[in-house]
Amino acid sequence: MKIAVLPGDGIGPEITAEAVKILNALGEKFELEEAPVGGAGYEAQGHPLPDSTLALARQADAILFGAVGDWKYDKLERALRPEQAILGLRKHLQLFANFRPAICYPQLTGASSLKPEIVSGLDILIVRELNGDIYFGAPRGLREAPDGPFAGAKEGFDTMRYSEPEVRRIAHVAFQAAQKRQKKLTSVDKANVLETSQLWRDTMIEVAKEYPDVELSHMYVDNAAMQLVKAPKAFDVVVTGNMFGDILSDEAAMLTGSIGMLPSASLDKDNKGLYEPSHGSAPDIAGKGVANPLATILSAAMMLRYSLGKAEQADRIESAVKKVLEQGYRTGDIATADGKVVGTKEMGDAVLKAL
Ligand code: NAD
């Protein structure tokens, strides 16, 4: 099995190195091949997603991605900026299903901004559609408003679009994920206002007939935002579109204490996927050896479970992460009064030892 390793920029190389260390210790015959991406791709080959990196990503069974971006590239034209690499990979590889688990480990309840009793034991999964919606819908642009009270003024416009097959495919992914958990699926939309959301809801209800063991409910996005901070443990799996998912998954991330703990997976129709921490390249702490590698290590665990068919190895890694938290190891972002603050490498070593 071939794994493309794309460390990227900022803390990307530091945290990816720790995940690679863990993968290499599992006793499996993985072939790991590294390639530059993001700012590193631009420096090496003049493009954030060099052709050779894209070719490797296509050829591999799974992709382990660090993070991309640095302030020093902010002046480059948009097409050459590091962030285009991740958008390009999602588009070229048709990675349409984004999985973001939000788990609040008991040892870290104090690190959350919510009361411990609200988040303790939290384990929810957000499934976000990644290829459609207002982020990609055409037409879009800037123009002179053709009508309305502000006719003639400069206006911006975007188009929210979802086709039925597009909703169907993410619905199947979400129902199947719910089947493997508590069998409760909440579909989040804005069907009281948006036609796109009405189609979304109707399609979810249709697909639900194929999954009688899963309990489907619907929630408007504004209410979902409220419920996520009021009673987050009432959710099991949440499925939603690209924009609502973007916002709700960051909200859910904060329930757990630190974005440095949150892995993610972006899958295609055959479960080939790109696995990355939910955070960015953290240029403010890059090179200091203090970044939390656990989100990347947990992303590697998701890769084993979803793309490589090695669920028992994923369990081993997740148990090892729980163990180091129990032992009191903490990077700065999750520091608690009773914890032992360590750097990136020491945290990786502790997981390795626990494994
Ligand atoms: P960020 O996630 O990089 O950082 C936000 C804050 O969280 C910072 O204070 C950072 O130090 C901290 N942080 C993030 N990850 C951490 C970790 N593992 N351990 C400890 N602390 C951690 O977001 P940002 O500052 O808004 O963006 C920085 C760069 O990352 C930008 O160029 C942005 O475009 C890019 N970005 C990339 C991705 C991606 O690669 N998928 C995602 C988001 C942002």
Image (spheres, rainbow, N blue to C red):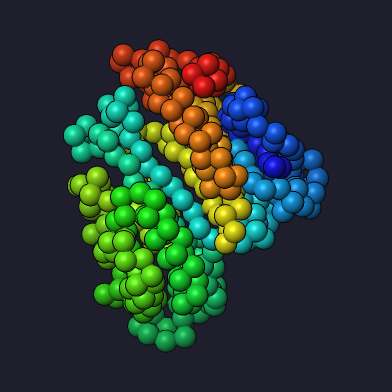
Does residue 200 appear to the left or right of 9 in the view shown? left
* Residue 316 appears anywhere in the view: yes
Where residue 75 sits: x, y (%)?
A: 65, 48
In front of the other: 281 or 350: 350
Q: Quadrant of the N terminus?
A: top right
Where residue 264 sits: x, y (%)?
A: 49, 45
In front of the other: 336 or 355: 355
Count of marks overlaid on the render = 0
Residue at image location 65% in from the left, 32% down from the top: 28
Residue at image location 52% in from the left, 22% down from the top: 355
Location of residue 344 by image quarter: top right
- Residue situated furthest bottom in the rendering: 147
Q: With respect to residue 80, does 323 lie above or below? A: above
Residue at image location 49% in from the left, 54% down from the top: 98
Residue at image location 23% in from the left, 53% down from the top: 226
Where residue 37 sits: x, y (%)?
A: 70, 43
